[in-house]
């Protein structure tokens, strides 16, 4: 159980910084220690406690004293998850040009529940002076994208992927027996979660719309990839391999192009193994000359309380080095320190 943050956290920030805001430099180590080692919910409480205690907005204070990638990371940590995703989408659309990779990452990897939460706050985040409305996010996508990629995003932003209810998932969990005696271990009986006949039909349909006819039926591809529940989707991918001796990713690469293909590929990779997708994304952020800092910050902050442990395991398997070490080698200063504090060394 997470301990609710105490009043002393806000006091600590203030005491460490009082008198230092008005000279060159700030006690960044104190900021990192307090902020990086708290949950997002605790940070919301810290903001409130700080304002109550000192009559001053903590975010405005930090914004006036910090800078660069360190400031961007600190600000991201203080934004509630759905609002942060909504802000990233807004920046991707309203910034100079459209950052399609951000839209692909968010809409291709978030759960239906997360997408519904993004929709609920997007209007206020994107247009704070305009009455919020659920359709605003679709309007922005309509205005800023086109073609098959636009259809992919409109479909994905509905958050309409089917989800298993807890009762169905619980019924599929069965004890592992040895000589008719329970071992204390459990497995998921996939036959109770997956409609194999439907998986075969969808695999056959995918083959037909990509390889067994002239041209590709993009709308049917969106339906196959965007709607089925996670386990059902994985079953379809397995049946497709049996049918074609190729994996789904290979077919997407061969039969689609541009951002539409990247969107489908991201969705498939996330459904197969979301931590692995984000581990690959982190490698991309830091590999080669220069660092994609905003992307690096977004991935680390948005996954910190969800699956960072699994992401680090995939990253280690992929690169033979820890994520902590990569960050240490690729970043510098307080920015490096706070990222390492978020991901943890172990």
Image (cartoon, rainbow, N blue to C red):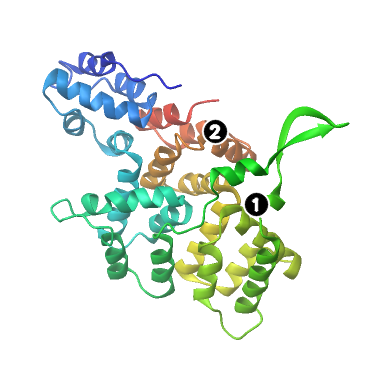
Q: Residue at x 41, y 32 (%)?
A: 339
User: Residue 183's spot in the image, x, y percent?
Assistant: 78, 28
Please, is residue 62 above or below residue 158 in the view?
above
User: Residue 268's spot in the image, x, y percent?
Assistant: 56, 58
Name the one closer to the observer, 134 or 219: 134
Please, is residue 70 above or below residue 92 in the view?
above
Can you identify the residue that label 1 sits on?
193
Q: Secondary structure at mark 1?
A: loop
Q: Residue at x 47, y 68 (%)?
A: 260
User: Residue 271's spot in the image, x, y percent?
Assistant: 56, 53
First in sequence, mark 2 or 1: give its number: 1
Q: Secondary structure at mark 2?
A: helix
User: Residue 264's spot in the image, x, y percent?
Assistant: 52, 63
Q: Residue at x 60, y 86 (%)?
A: 214
- Residue at the limit of the structure toward the right, as seen here: 179
Can you identify the residue that label 2 sits on?
309
Q: Residue at x 28, y 54 (%)?
A: 91
The CA span between labels 2 and 1 is 26 Å
**Residue 218 in view of the camera:** yes
**In the drawing, what numbered circle is on residue 68?**
none
């Amino acid at each position: 159980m997470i301990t609710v943050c105490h009043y002393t956290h806000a006091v600590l920030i203030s005491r460490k910084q009082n008198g230092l805001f008005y000279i060159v430099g700030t006690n960044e180590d104190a900021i990192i220690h307090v902020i990086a080692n708290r949950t997002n919910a605790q940070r919301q409480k810290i903001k409130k406690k700080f304002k109550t205690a000192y009559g001053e907005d903590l975010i405005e204070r930090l914004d006036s004293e910090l800078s660069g990638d360190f400031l961007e990371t600190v600000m991201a940590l203080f934004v509630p998850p759905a609002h942060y995703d909504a802000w990233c989408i807004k920046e991707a659309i309203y910034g100079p040009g459209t950052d399609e990779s951000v839209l692909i990452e968010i809409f291709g990897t978030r759960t239906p529940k997360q997408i519904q939460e993004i929709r609920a706050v997007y209007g206020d985040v994107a247009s704070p002076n305009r009455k919020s409305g659920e359709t605003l996010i679709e309007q922005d996508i309509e205005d800023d994208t086109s073609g098959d990629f636009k259809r992919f995003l409109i479909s994905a932003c509905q958050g309409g992927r089917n989800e298993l209810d807890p009762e169905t998932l619980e019924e599929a969990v069965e004890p592992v027996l040895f000589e008719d005696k329970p071992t204390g271990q459990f497995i998921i009986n996939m036959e109770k979660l997956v409609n194999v006949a439907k998986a075969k039909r969808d695999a056959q349909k995918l083959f037909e719309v990509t390889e067994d006819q002239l041209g590709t039926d993009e709308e049917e591809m969106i339906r196959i990839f965007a709607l089925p529940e996670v386990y059902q989707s994985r079953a379809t991918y397995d049946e497709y391999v049996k049918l074609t001796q190729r994996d789904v990713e290979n077919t997407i690469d061969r039969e689609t192009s541009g951002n539409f293909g990247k969107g489908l590929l991201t969705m498939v990779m996330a459904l197969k193994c979301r931590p692995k997708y984000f581990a690959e994304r982190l490698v991309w952020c830091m590999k080669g000359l220069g660092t994609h800092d905003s992307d690096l910050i977004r991935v680390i902050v948005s996954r910190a309380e969800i699956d960072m442990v699994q992401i680090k395991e995939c990253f280690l398997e992929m690169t033979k080095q820890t994520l902590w070490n990569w960050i240490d080698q690729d970043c510098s200063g307080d920015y490096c320190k706070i990222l390492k504090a978020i991901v943890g060394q172990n």
